[in-house]
């Protein structure tokens, strides 16, 4: 079912002269009202994230034409037309604001209550992560309903503008929704678009960067005193460095905060890969943390590492878990890139299976060698998992492997029979921050 919105406002944001308005309410009577609504939303969300992290995150004023110009410039640079879709739940309806790189802005009002929408989100996420439902497609009905609410109202505009890359800025209750797994009845959203996730335009890093010939610092732990083991981590690290990328890798005892800082002083690493538990929990930013071998690093401490002294362009966290349905946990996850000061973070919404993470991360780094952006590399990896096309070759025995690596373990035998097509395995991974 495709829902018919109560209201639609479309403007040409580049000139603000071409205005198409079809409205049965007075909330957004003209282009200026829509832009003012967007500005107020951006300011409110920036304040919300700044209060959560306890630091001012932006001193810019929201300029709508600047956002459209950024979308247009990045679309040309990446040869991929882009759009930002805001989704804001209200008590009695869902508000959508779409801005495209071609200069079109659309506002839609969808008749679904916040309670019904967020309950559907919860049911959908619970269905995806239920280990007893990995062979079931029962999630599909919920995926289609969410698509009807969040995507279908703007699908005509997306198609008309030829959008290829869809960036989400999501309101309370939606910030950890696995958008890639939404379904239109024919296919998943990731089959139509590459996807990104930002806390808001004011908090988005849109600078261009290149990861070609980048050095990777890969670190992680397979054993923990008070958390579940991650037995595939040694092989995950070995599959990235040195098999796919140049750099260094450190496992368990070598995975300390001190060693991370020491290695960054000795060499420039554009990519940091941390294969460890990262927990986004209720409470303030100090309650959420990354687990190192010797200590926990809270989100508030993360910024103190000065990632820009030797610029890090991409941080990969391959074993995250977020408290679903909690506003503070959502803010911590969605604001991770802007809080850390790293342009792009690739992280998971829930703790994906150990072997599934190994295979998907190996494919991601394989794709990243040639893909123009991390978002495209992630999409190609997710499509490979969905279509059963992941091809993993264990790294050869080498003195360069991290101590403790068991080559060939813990992969199932034969690996070809491992089915990662269920969205539990691939839809949890998402790009945060710089959406390209």
Image (cartoon, rainbow, N blue to C red):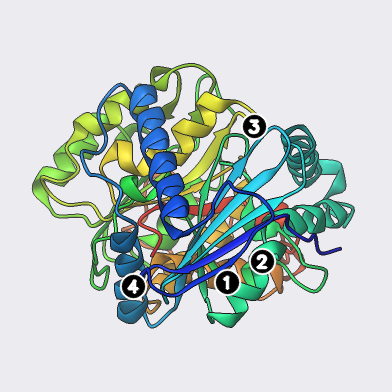
Residue at figure coordinates x 63%, y 56% from the top left: 108
The answer to whether residue 316 shows anywhere in this view is: no
For image coordinates 23% across by 57% down, the residue present is 270
> Tag on residue 259?
none
N-terminal-most mark, 4 or 1: 4
**Real-space Cα separation, disc 1 to disc 3, in angstroms:** 25 Å
For the residue labelled by badge 1, is the local secondary structure a helix, a strand or a loop? loop
Callout 1: few (<14), some (14-19), or many (20+) C-alpha neighbours within 10 Å? Answer: some
Disc 1: which residue: 193
- Label 3 and label 2: CA atoms lie apart by 21 Å
Task: Characterize the local packing of mark 3: few (<14), some (14-19) or many (20 or more) Cα atoms within 10 angstroms.
Answer: many
Q: Which of the two discs, 3 and 2, labels the residue nearer the N terminus?
A: 2
Q: For residue 55, say whether it is visible.
A: yes
Label 2: how many residues lie within 10 Å, few (<14), some (14-19) or many (20+)? Answer: some
- Indicate which disc residue 324 carries: 3
> In whole angstroms, how far apart are the C-alphas of marks 4 and 1?
27 Å
* x and y percentages locating residue 405 in the rendered image: 46, 49
Chain-order first, disc 2 or disc 4: 4
Q: Kindly identify which numbered label has been placed on residue 15.
A: 4
Q: Which residue is mark 2?
A: 189
């Amino acid at each position: 079912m495709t829902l018919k919105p109560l209201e639609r406002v479309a403007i040409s944001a580049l000139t603000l002269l071409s205005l198409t308005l079809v409205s049965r309410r007075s909330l957004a009577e003209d282009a200026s009202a829509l832009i003012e609504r967007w500005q107020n939303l951006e300011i409110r969300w920036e304040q919300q994230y700044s209060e959560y992290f306890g630091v001012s995150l932006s001193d810019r004023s929201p300029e709508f034409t600047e956002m459209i110009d950024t979308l247009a410039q990045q679309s040309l640079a990446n040869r991929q037309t882009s759009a930002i879709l805001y989704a804001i739940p209200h008590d009695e309806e869902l508000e959508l604001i779409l801005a495209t790189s071609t200069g079109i802005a659309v506002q839609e009002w969808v008749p679904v209550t916040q309670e019904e929408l967020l309950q559907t989100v919860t049911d959908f996420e619970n269905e995806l992560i239920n280990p007893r439902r990995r062979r079931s497609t029962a999630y599909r009905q919920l995926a289609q309903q969410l698509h009807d609410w969040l995507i279908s109202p703007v699908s005509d505009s997306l198609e008309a503008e030829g959008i290829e890359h869809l960036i989400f800025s999501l309101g309370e209750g939606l910030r950890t929704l696995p958008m890639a797994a939404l379904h239109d009845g024919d296919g998943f959203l990731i089959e139509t678009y590459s996807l990104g996730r930002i806390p808001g335009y004011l908090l988005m890093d849109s600078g261009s960067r290149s990861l070609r010939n980048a050095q990777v610092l890969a670190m992680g732990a397979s054993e923990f005193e008070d958390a579940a083991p991650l037995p595939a981590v040694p092989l995950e690290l070995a599959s990235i460095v040195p098999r796919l990328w140049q750099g260094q890798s450190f496992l368990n005892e070598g995975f300390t905060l001190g060693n991370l800082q020491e290695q960054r002083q000795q060499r420039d690493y554009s990519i940091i890969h941390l294969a460890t538990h990262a927990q986004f929990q209720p409470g303030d930013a100090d309650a959420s943390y990354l687990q190192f071998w010797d200590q926990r690093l809270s989100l508030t401490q993360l910024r103190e590492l000065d990632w820009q002294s030797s610029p890090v362009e991409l941080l990969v966290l391959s074993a995250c878990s977020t408290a679903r349905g909690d506003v503070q946990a959502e803010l911590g996850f969605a604001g991770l890139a802007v809080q850390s000061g790293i342009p792009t973070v690739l992280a998971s919404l829930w703790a994906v299976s150990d072997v599934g993470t190994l295979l998907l991360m190996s494919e991601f780094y394989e794709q990243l060698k040639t893909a123009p952006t991390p978002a495209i590399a992630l999409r190609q990896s997710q499509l490979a998992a969905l279509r059963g096309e992941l091809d993993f070759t264990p790294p050869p025995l080498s003195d360069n492997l991290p101590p403790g690596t068991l080559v060939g373990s813990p992969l199932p035998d034969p690996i070809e029979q491992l089915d990662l097509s269920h969205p539990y395995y691939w839809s949890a991974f998402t790009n945060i921050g710089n959406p390209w």
